[in-house]
Amino acid sequence: MNDLERLQMRFEAAVQAARDETALEEVRAAFLGRSGEINAIRRSIGRLAPADRPSAGKAINDTVERMETVLGERQTVLAALDVQRKLEERIDVTFPATQPQVGSIHPVRRVIEDACAYFERHGFAVVLGPEVEPAYYNFDALNIPEGHPAREALDSFWIDDTLLLRPHTSPMQIRTMQLHKPPIAIVAPGKCYRRDAVDARHLFQFHQIEGLLVAEGIHFGHLKGMLAGLCRALYGPYQRVRFRPSFFPFTEPSAEVDTTCPKCQGKTTACSMCGGAGWIELGGAGMVHPNVLREVGYDPEIVSGWAFGFGAERLALARYEVDDIRRFIDSDPDFLEQLA
Ligand code: DAH
């Protein structure tokens, strides 16, 4: 291998090692520049015998030509790499941003808020009360005296002999009527507690929405109208409501209120939501018992009223077509996101 070939090899290695235009220019200057290695070799031609000079000159020119080709190729490659790098570094402002994790309103809370909003549109006030109540508000004032079997049905958590976690929101009827003169129009949403075994339909802590309207001339028709309107507000304009005769000590007459199963609309016998009944039970209602009105100092000869107490989880089950009430307290983000 002669000197020129060795030079060519060193040149090519240097060119490949050059990572950018500036480094490549330095290589070019070192080999092909005015005081570069090629010129040094050219100057040495003078020392050769005259007969050898033309072939030496040609060999040098050939080498220079090859070097320039190599240089040009590397330049093309570096330019392409440069473009690619710039493309990769560019910020695409149209690219969708990473979504931050945000929560959503719990379906039970949403149904409570929507129900309250419906009543507020009709002039009702929303009132909240204590979850630990004396037996007086939970039972006695609601026409459920000591020893009454209805007291047993509301399997309660007792704090001591007279205080308990409220098993229903009905105490708020008494508290409101004791504080205000009629007319009264309130809804009272909130947590309730019962010693119930947890299954697909029961929780030991759940929510109710209580409603109470007391004024002169109030009758059962007003109750039916408002509750049918509530179901249409929550489930859609064709929702129907059914009243079944029932018994509650604090209302007379009393009714159990059902709404058409939103899943099958009463059309199938194998519906997982209503078990083929076609109806979902929402809770109790009725005309406020005269004893309850008397207890708070109202005159049942002058005023009358209706009341209802619905399970909020029941309202939500029917609305979101959920077949197990425990899903609401599982805290499973996938489930909650679907209903958000
Ligand atoms: N408090 C009753 C319960 O939890 C439900 C209820 C029935 C409430 C009739 C009412 C009513 O206001 O009028 O089982």
Image (cartoon, grey):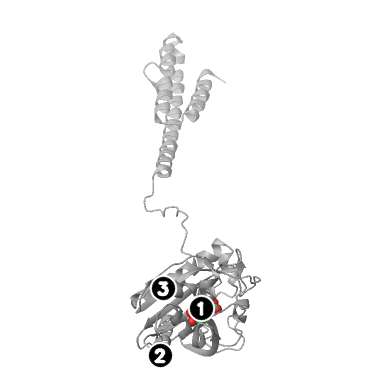
Q: Residues within 10 Å of mark 3 (few under 14, many from 20)?
A: some
Mark carried by residue 56 = none
Q: Mark 1 points at which residue?
A: 142
Q: Return the residue nearer the eye: 135 or 194.
A: 135
Name the kind of residue labelled 3 in the image. Answer: Gln
Q: Residues within 10 Å of mark 1 (few under 14, many from 20)?
A: many
Residue 155, image x, y percentages? 62, 73
Mark carried by residue 221 = 2
Q: Distance between the residues labelled 3 and 1?
A: 13 Å
Sequence-first disc among 3 and 1: 1
Local SS, label 2? helix
Q: Return the residue nearer the eye: 289 or 319.
A: 289
Cβ of disc 1 within 8 Å of ligand 1?
A: yes
Q: Mark 3 points at which residue?
A: 178
Sequence-first disc among 3 and 2: 3
Cβ of disc 3 within 8 Å of ligand 1?
A: no
Q: How far apart are marks 2 and 1 (CA)?
A: 23 Å
